[in-house]
Image (tube, grey):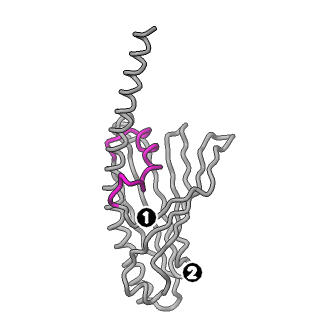
Amino acid sequence: MKVFASDCTFDYSWEEVSTANWRKYCPWNDKSPHVMAVDTLSRRIEPDTGILRTERLITCQQNAPQWVVSLLGGGTTSHVYEVSYVDPASKKVTMCSTNLTWSNVLSVRETVTYQPSKTDPSRKTDFSQDAKITALCGGWQKVKAKIEEASVERFRENAKRGREGFEAVLEMSRRVFGEQRELELRQQQQQQMVA
């Protein structure tokens, strides 16, 4: 098993980050063209806790090295199952995902969290990501190690692009929501002047 871990801080509030998270794979993010579709399978608020639980299926264009595709077979489309929890009381988003494609030979379990930053909780959000990657190909130790190493490296590259893309989504969200707030404020002022 190989582990990939990454942390960073976004210069956006937890409210902005947790809202923009649902737009992570929208056209504003030009760093994730491999994501073909995001389908929401279920969404509900847990009555006892107020936690929003969402299950999604993410469909991607496979980006694996050709030697891995040749060895393992399969097509160019892959699927990831994601369960997320948004806890508004503790201000924490937790997303857990696992691969469905090639799951008989490769297990990828990722956990991502977003929480208000310890240094500036009203204006910044801490991001933490870890992935446990395990090749399940029995006694082929060299092949297993190569698959895990290639997977971790691919994960590292995708994580960097993912953060850059999410920054673009956050920036656009702030601008769009700011413009919307200004429009609503002007409309309220106009209504008050008429009344």
In this view, the residue in front, 151 or 4, is: 151
Above or below 22: residue 103: below
What numbered label is drawn on residue 173?
A: none
Residue 190: image location, x then y, percent: 39, 16
Q: Can you name the residue that lies furthest to the front here?
A: 194
Q: How many numbered circles are shown?
A: 2
Mark closest to the chain's N terminus, 1 or 2: 1
Q: How crowded is mark 1: few (under 14 residues within 10 Å), some or many (20 or more)?
A: some
Residue indicated by mark 2: 104
Q: Label 2's element?
A: loop
Q: Are marks 1 and 2 in contact (CB under 8 Å)?
A: no
Residue at 39 percent of width and 74 percent of height: 63
Q: Can you name the residue that lies furthest to the right here?
A: 47
Q: Residues within 10 Å of mark 2 (few under 14, many from 20)?
A: few
Residue indicated by mark 1: 35
Residue 27: image location, x then y, percent: 38, 54
Residue 15 falls in image quadrant: top left
Residue at 33 percent of width and 52 percent of height: 8
Residue 28 colored magenta? yes
Apparent side of residue 149 relative to residue 54 in the rendered image (left or right) = left
| Residue stretch rendered in magenta on the structure | 10-31
Above or below 115: residue 32: below
